[in-house]
Amino acid sequence: MKHFLSTSDWTKSELQEILDFATTLKNDPFQPLLKNKSIAMLFFNPSSRTRTSFEVGINELSGTAIILQPGKDAWPIEFEDNIVMDGSAEEHVKEVAKVLASYCDCIAIRAFPVFKDWQRDKTDLVINSFAKYSSVPVVNMETIEHPCQELAHILTLQEHFGDLRGKNYLLTWTYHPKPLNTAVANSSLMIASKFGMNVTMLCPSKEYYLDEKYIQAATDNCKKEGSEFNISHNIEKAYSEKDIVYAKSWGCLSSYGQPEIQMASNNTHKNFIVDSHKMSLTKSGVFSHCLPLRRNIKATDEVMDSDYCLAIKEAANRKHVQKSLLTKIL
Ligand code: CP
């Protein structure tokens, strides 16, 4: 049994197998590969794409998807060990994981950080607790990483470029009116470097650096692949000669849990929006984003409506890669 918590636990060739079978499924979508299989999907946070793409994809493979929202339509869950449960939680993950595993063949989890203490959030307690106590595979539908988005991102880029080795890839921070999860940015660094691209991370200052774990992963992957990783605070230089621009806003780890301080800083960096002038500096580059995206905040209408915007294709590929993933792990 193998969980899908992070692409860092999977080799590039294992991931490529998932991507290749996703292409097969894209051309031949309706196959009974999950017949008599049930997947419990627990959403601790909202979702449009993840929920829809998993649910439709599971149906297309003749499986059954069960959606639960703990604290809303399902009992709230406790994750701390050795605790007197006199708060809002009605049951412990030890029971929830074991019970769901007795009914279902897979448990998929979306559980964002709580944005108070990064040292605590980075332990990814919710999904790791399910992985610890579940006897069936656990799939990450976005926690502090978003590995399903990574698969869709790479499939979309491979469809556009073919081999990605040596391509020049930019992850750019963008402004957003509230501090957001670092998950997609963390994932972007890990997967772009794993697939052999030269990776640049553009952000306003050192305060916006992602966690050392992801900087180190990008550094190590690039070294292994013979490519380059660098961090830039210079917008014009960072966009120059890029083949791919991937945009994401994320909250500063240096003022994590202090949204007023984060926003005072973010408000001085609205110029990080992706616009057609910046894209004109690239090597006729493509643009993408995981979505949802606030237009004319993170990227302009002109960029979002351009032929070089791959965001819709990337979102559509979520369904195919997740069907392939579930088939592989089940
Ligand atoms: N990209 C993504 O995961 O979208 P949702 O938050 O809508 O699921």
Image (cartoon, helix red, strand yellow):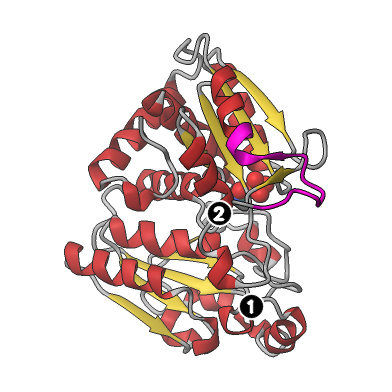
Q: Dot 1, how many residues are within 10 Å of its Cα: few (below 14), some (14-19), or many (20+)?
A: some
Q: Mark 2 points at which residue?
A: 125
The answer to whether residue 249 is above or below residue 44 is: below
Locate residue 173, reporting x and y percent.
Answer: 56, 74
Q: Does the magenta stretch include residue 88?
A: yes
SS at badge 1:
loop
Left or right, 138 with respect to 242, comes to: right
Hey, what amino acid is under mark 1? Tyr
Locate residue 141, reporting x and y percent.
Answer: 56, 44
Q: Give the range drawn in magenta.
A: 83-96
Locate residue 256, reporting x and y percent.
Answer: 64, 78
Hey, what amino acid is under mark 2? Leu
Where is residue 179, by image quadrant?
bottom right
In the picture, the disc for residue 179 is: none
Left or right, 136 with respect to 180, comes to: left
Residue drawn at x 40%, y 43% as measured from the top left? 155
Q: Nearer the N terminus, badge 2 or badge 1?
A: 2
In the picture, the disc for residue 256 is: 1
The answer to whether residue 128 is above or below residue 245 is: above
Locate residue 255, reporting x and y percent.
Answer: 63, 83
Left or right, 309 with respect to 267, comes to: left
